[in-house]
Structures are given as C-alpha cells and as structure tokens.
Image (spheres, rainbow, N blue to C red):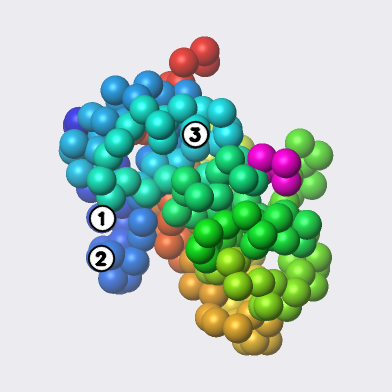
C-alpha cells in the first residue's frame, strides 16, 4: 500500500525536522466511507489505528473485521443515546464535548475510555466542540469519573487550500493544553493533541500534534465524493 508508506514517511520526515522523538506522533487512518477490504489492506501493511465518524459504520466494521490489536478511534459527534453502542468497541474518543456525554460514557463503559475534548477555535456554525473557556470549566468536573481517562484535546481548523492558515489554530490548541496542565485542572497530565489532516498534518506536527488524522492521502477520496 504505497500511499500509506508515503504518508508514514512524510510523518517521519516532519518529526525528524522538528527534532521530536520518532514515536511521538500516532498516525490515525481515517477510514470513514472506505471498504472493509481497504482497511484490511492497510492493516496488513502495518497500520493499527483507524478513525470512524459514524456509529452505524463503526458497528458494521468492528463486526466485520476481526483483526488483533486494531485500535478504533471515534472522531465524529457522539449522541448520548448511542454511547452504549460505541464505548466498548473503541480505544479512543476524540469528540468529548459535554459533561452529559461524559456521564453517559462513565455509566456505560466497562473500563476507562481514553478521551479527548473537542475544542472549537473557529466561528464556524457547522462545527461542534467546546470553546476554550467552557473546556477550562468542564475539566475539573471529570476528575471523579472513573471511566473517563482524559488525555488531551482535539480540534479541526477551518479548511483552507493553504495549510499555513491552520497553523494559528494548532498553536492555540497547544497553548490551551499547556495552560490546562499549568493550572492542574485534571488529575493527570494531559499529553495528547489530535490535530492535522491530509492537507495540513505537517504543519500540525510542527506545532506539537501527537495524533494526525489522515484519510484521503492514504485511501483516496471517499465513496460518493
């Protein structure tokens, strides 16, 4: 799978250029809209982390693909009434955006779920997520939830053909995470920054991303696009 190899090499080269540890960035192959065969092909090529956005599609793929050591990341907006369908099938949730959702996960999950707060840094009305000020207020309320393992933050900047336009948003997320740790808002250090997609992941890594979410650069355009 040459595209996957090329993306991994681009990630590796960017990490080297920034002087960071070679294993400091996790590549998530965004497989929404992709066939199970394509996911299996990527798995056989060494990919282990896959991202999905829709509950029904995630359920179909987790049932249809019995692969050892595969890690599913849920990236889309998760409704409280669908928590029980998802939480025990995924390794990571990138879109925690309310106390109500956290309480539902805490109740339904069989073990601590690694979660990222989704942060909205733009004024786009179509985007979900918490404003920084609301996120700062929410974090202390998660400390007593034993099945919520808060690990960091996620954001999606407005799309622009020029990837440099994403840099201020990535830098703002990095600084927000730093502030959260300096204020000791959570019981453990927050270390994860999920930011950067196919067109701007190199900028994201330069600005401190620990996870990049890449779909089209690995799989090509999704069905229906």
**Residue 100 sits in which quadrant?**
bottom right
Question: What separation in Å lies between label 1 and label 2 (alpha carbons)?
Answer: 7 Å
Q: Mark 2 points at which residue?
A: 22
Residue 153 visible in the displayed image: no
Q: Residue 90: x percent and y percent? A: 47, 48
Q: Which of marks 2 and 3 is in front?
A: 3
Question: What separation in Å lies between label 1 and label 3 (alpha carbons)?
Answer: 28 Å
**Residue toward you, 26 or 63:** 63
Q: Name the residue under label 3.
A: 58
Give whichever of discs 1 and 2 has the lower sequence position.
1
- Judged from the image, the secondary structure of the residue bearing numbered disc 1 is helix
Tag 1 near tag 2, CB within 8 Å: yes
Q: Which mark is residue 196?
A: none
Q: Name the residue under label 1.
A: 12
Residue occupying the point 49% across, 72% down: 191
Residue 138 visible in the displayed image: yes
Give whichever of discs 2 and 3 has the lower sequence position.
2
Q: Residue 207: x percent and y percent? A: 48, 63
Q: Give the range drawn in magenta.
A: 77-82
Residue occupying the point 19% across, 31% down: 2
- Judged from the image, the secondary structure of the residue bearing numbered disc 2 is loop
**Side of 17 where 75 appears, left or right:** right
Question: What separation in Å lies between label 2 and label 3 (alpha carbons)?
Answer: 30 Å
| Residue 6 painted magenta | no
**Residue 148 sits in which quadrant?**
bottom right
- Judged from the image, the secondary structure of the residue bearing numbered disc 3 is helix
Looking at the image, residue 186 lies above or below residue 218: below
**Residue toward you, 12 or 34:** 34
């Amino acid at each position: 799978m040459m595209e996957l190899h090329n993306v991994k090499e681009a990630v590796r080269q960017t990490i080297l250029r920034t002087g960071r540890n070679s294993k400091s960035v996790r590549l998530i192959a965004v497989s929404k809209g992709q066939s199970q065969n394509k996911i299996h092909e990527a798995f056989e090529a060494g990919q282990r982390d896959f991202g999905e956005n829709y509950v029904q599609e995630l359920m179909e793929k987790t049932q249809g693909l019995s692969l050892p050591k595969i890690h599913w990341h849920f990236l889309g907006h998760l409704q409280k009434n669908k928590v029980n369908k998802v939480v025990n099938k995924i390794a990571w949730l990138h879109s925690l955006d309310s106390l109500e959702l956290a309480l539902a996960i805490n109740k339904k999950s069989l073990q601590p779920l690694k979660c990222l707060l989704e942060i909205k840094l733009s004024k786009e009305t179509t985007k979900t997520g918490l404003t920084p000020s609301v996120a700062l207020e929410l974090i202390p309320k998660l400390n007593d939830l034993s099945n919520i393992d808060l690990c960091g933050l996620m954001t999606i900047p407005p799309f622009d053909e020029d990837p440099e336009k994403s840099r201020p948003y990535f830098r703002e997320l990095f600084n927000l995470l730093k502030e959260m740790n300096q204020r000791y808002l959570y019981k453990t250090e927050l270390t994860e920054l999920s930011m950067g997609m196919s067109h701007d992941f190199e900028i994201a890594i330069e600005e401190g991303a620990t996870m990049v979410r890449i779909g089209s650069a690995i799989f090509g355009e999704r069905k229906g696009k």
